[in-house]
Amino acid sequence: MSARGGKKKATKLSRSARAGVIFPVGRMMRYLRTGTHKYRIGMGAPVYMAAVIEYLAAEILELAGNAARDNKKGRITPRHIKLAVANDEELNQLLRGVTISNGGVLPRIHPELLSKKRGSRVKVDTQVTVPEKRAERSKSTKKPSIKKGKGKPGRKPRVKNDKEAVPNSTAEDGPGDGFTILSAKSLFLGQKLSLTESELSKIGTIKVEGIINPTNAEMDLKEGVGNALEKAGGREFLDGVKELRKAQGPLEVASVAVGQANGMAARFIIHCNVPQWGSEKCEEQLEKTVKNCLSAAEEKKLKSVAFPSLPAGRNGFPKQTAAQLILKAISNHFVSSTTSSLKNIYFVLFDSESIGIYLQEMAKLDAK
């Protein structure tokens, strides 16, 4: 009651305020009624519609903000929205038929365009076939040398040296069939950093001595690279991982565990617990993970190692941020170390977007 005895006016609340959303519920109701005269529209329909559109807008803005921050921009542009939608599998599937104005295109470089400058499958094939011809020539030249010898039986162990030289030559020549080298860079100590394109199912056939398997604390093999390695290695590899899990226990964040690569061309599998995006000091932990993987490979005296693409998306690192941190960690590791057994490091990527991002970041390293 007021001082004059009248009733106090009640403040009007909008339908959006009563529903607890920001987007206008009344306008959604008006849009639903336009062109849908044949159907009855309930009072809750515009509320649900406003809530869903508000959630989608918040998700896209959050991912676009991350893309803008990765590109060191303070304002979100249509280009950042395009990259945010493309990075997320669910949003990309939902908006696959939508054209974003001024969003640009996704980075995609065909390997044929890089054949002259950065190498392609043709160069890899020639590198793989040349040692075979040399091996045939060496065998043909070694036959008369054995006859010309003084007849000492102690010279027969040369055959063992030839067998030992075969895996070293294959590891140095290239990653093998089905792997296309797109770009290469020399590091501080002379190591060769190569950007390689392939399919996820072929990761177990790569001709390297060590393969990095990004996993969790339980060394799970259900998804991604772990699933492909399990299919390539079979039951023997799975039993080896179970024994390693029992002996090693749960992996801490950024820690690694080295196991045998049974049934594969590689010798060892380096399992690493990759930190989750948004956790405490996640960027420092990712750099530490990469350095621990390289240190574990050096302890086993490995000469070549393969890095598959780390998890990215809604629950993982943004691809741009992950590429910057991983390349920085590898470069700093070899700058700070005096010697290293590693000679070749392969980044094995499976999608065109990651390839474009890593090509861009490797070009920045060359510029520096």
Image: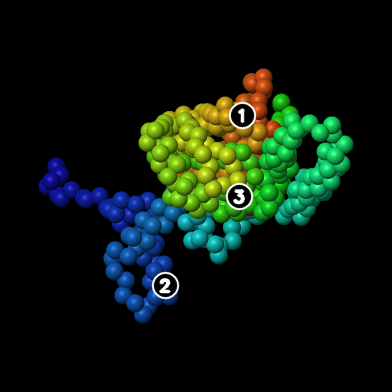
* Residue 68 seen by the camera: no
Residue 205, disc: 3
The x and y percentages for residue 308 are 58, 44
Q: Along the polypeptide, which appears first: circle 2 or circle 1? A: 2
Residue at 58% from the left image edge and 39% from the top image edge: 267
Q: Quadrant of the C terminus?
A: top right
The x and y percentages for residue 32 are 39, 69
Specify the quadrant of the image occupied by residue 153.
Answer: top right
Q: Residues within 10 Å of mark 3 (few under 14, many from 20)?
A: some
Are the residues flagged by discs 2 and 3 in contact, CB closer than 8 Å? Answer: no
Q: Which residue is mark 2?
A: 34
Residue at 15% from the left image edge and 44% from the top image edge: 2
Mark 2 vs mark 3, foreground winner is: 3
Q: Along the polypeptide, which appears first: circle 3 or circle 1? A: 3
Vertically, is 45 above or below 2? Answer: below
Q: Secondary structure at mark 3?
A: helix
Q: Which residue is mark 1?
A: 301
Q: Residues within 10 Å of mark 2 (few under 14, many from 20)?
A: few
Vertically, is 122 above or below 252? Answer: below
Q: Residues within 10 Å of mark 1 (few under 14, many from 20)?
A: few
Amino acid under label 1?
A: Lys
Q: Is residue 143 left or right of residue 220?
A: right
Amino acid under label 3?
A: Thr
* Residue 18 seen by the camera: yes
Separation (CA) of disc 2 from disc 3: 58 Å
Mark 2 vs mark 1, foreground winner is: 1
Q: Along the polypeptide, which appears first: circle 2 or circle 3? A: 2
Q: Is residue 165 left or right of residue 142?
A: left
Q: Secondary structure at mark 1?
A: loop
Vertically, is 63 above or below 30? Answer: above
